[in-house]
Image (cartoon, rainbow, N blue to C red):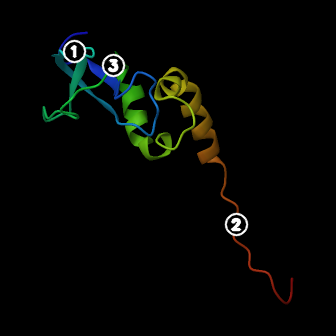
Amino acid sequence: MEKGDYVLATKYSDGDPRDHWAVGFFDKMLEYSSGDRFMVVDGDGEQFRGNGFRRAERIPTECGNWMVKNSKVLEQASISIWGIRRRWRKLKKEWADICSRPSPRARRGGLGD
């Protein structure tokens, strides 16, 4: 991995979506006695986590943008961030199909129905 690569990073290797995760740019490695950490920065060059991330992988820009846009939903997911990353194209299509369906119309019941 090289400085400036667009990455997905997770606090722990398992990628639990309820733990800290980020989409950003690889900065450098930080040495720790418990294992090296990936340092990831935002677009302004600010670190996301002072202690770094245990796992990071390069990702396509389109994938990262989709994950950021849907981060509130992804944080509630029951599968790993890494599982979501592997399936993002399929999820993107499924969500687009769901979102393109007409919304059910509200209907008020009462006399005259």
Q: Which residue is mark 2?
A: 105
- Is residue 7 shown left or right of residue 113? left
- The amino acid pointed to by label 1 is Ser
Q: Give the residue displayed 29% in from the left and 25% down from the top.
A: 53
Q: Give the residue displayed 21% in from the left and 15% down from the top.
A: 33
Q: Quadrant of residue 30?
A: top left
Q: Which residue is mark 3?
A: 56
- The amino acid pointed to by label 2 is Arg
Q: Give the residue displayed 46% in from the left and 36% down from the top.
A: 17
Which of the two residues, 71 or 11, is positioned nearer the viewer here? 11
Residue 44: horizontal and vertical position, in percent? 13, 36
Residue 14: horizontal and vertical position, in percent? 46, 24
Residue 26: horizontal and vertical position, in percent? 22, 20
> CA separation, marks 3 and 2?
44 Å
Q: Indicate the quadrant containing the N terminus: top left, top right, bottom left or bottom right.
A: top left
Tell me the tag on residue 2.
none
Which of the two residues, 105 or 84, is positioned nearer the viewer here? 84
Q: Indicate the quadrant containing the C terminus: top left, top right, bottom left or bottom right.
A: bottom right
Q: Secondary structure at mark 2?
A: loop
Q: Which residue is mark 1?
A: 33
Q: Give the residue displayed 37% in from the left and 20% down from the top.
A: 60
Badge 3 crowding class, 10 Å Cα cut-off, few under 14, some 14 to 19, many 20 or more, is: many
Q: Is residue 64 above or below residue 99?
A: above
Q: Quadrant of residue 32?
A: top left
> CA separation, marks 1 and 2?
58 Å
Q: Secondary structure at mark 1?
A: loop
| Comes first in the chain, label 1 or label 3 | 1
